Amino acid sequence: MSDERHVLVLPDRDGAEEAAEELADRFGVTDEPQLVRDALAGEDDAEDAQWLVVVEDPDHRLDPAALDAFAAEYEGWLEAP
């Protein structure tokens, strides 16, 4: 079975950092999520960047619907696989 990974797309770094910390408390994520800055196509301004929170889920324990609702609390969403 292949490793599963979930990508939460969030509008700013502060929200991404908060969400990454909260994932451990709320979902029991043990591996630290990876934060990735995703500049929007054609935008050079650092303010116009989204932040990705990459969560490894090798045991397929995380519910995508719950992660999407969680991301929505930070004005973001779960990227479709």
Image (spheres, grey):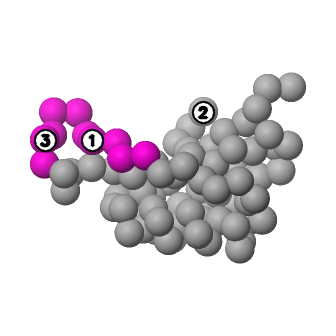
Mark 3–mark 2 distance (CA, rounded to whole Å): 27 Å
Residue 43 found in image quarter: top left
Residue carrying label 1 = 39
Image x and y of residue 31, in percent: 71, 53
Asked if the residues shown at circle 3 and circle 2 are in contact, with their CB atoms under 8 angstroms apart, the answer is no
Residue 24 is left or right of residue 77, and the answer is right
- Cα gap from disc 3 to disc 1, whole angstroms: 8 Å
The kind of residue on which mark 2 rests is Pro
Please tell me which residue lies in front, 9 or 53.
53
**Number of other residues with Cα within 10 Å of mark 1, as a class: few under 14, some 14 to 19, many 20 or more:** some
Which dot, 3 or 2, sits closer to the camera? 3
Q: Does the segment drawn in magenta span residue 42?
A: yes
Q: Specify which label sits upstream in the sequence, 3 or 2.
A: 3
Label whose residue precedes the other's in the sequence (2 or 1): 1
Asked if the residues shown at circle 3 and circle 1 are in contact, with their CB atoms under 8 angstroms apart, the answer is yes
Q: Residue at x 56, y 37 (%)?
A: 80
Q: Give above or below for 18 relative to 6.
A: below
Residues shaded magenta: 36-45
In this view of the protein, can residue 6 be seen by the observer? yes
Tag of residue 13? none
| Residue denoted by label 2 | 81
Residue 65 appears in view: no
> For the residue marked with disc 1, what is the amino acid?
Ala
Closest to the camera, between mark 2 and mark 1, is 1
Instruction: Look at the numbered disc 3 and give the secondary structure of its residue.
Output: loop
Magenta residue check for 27? no
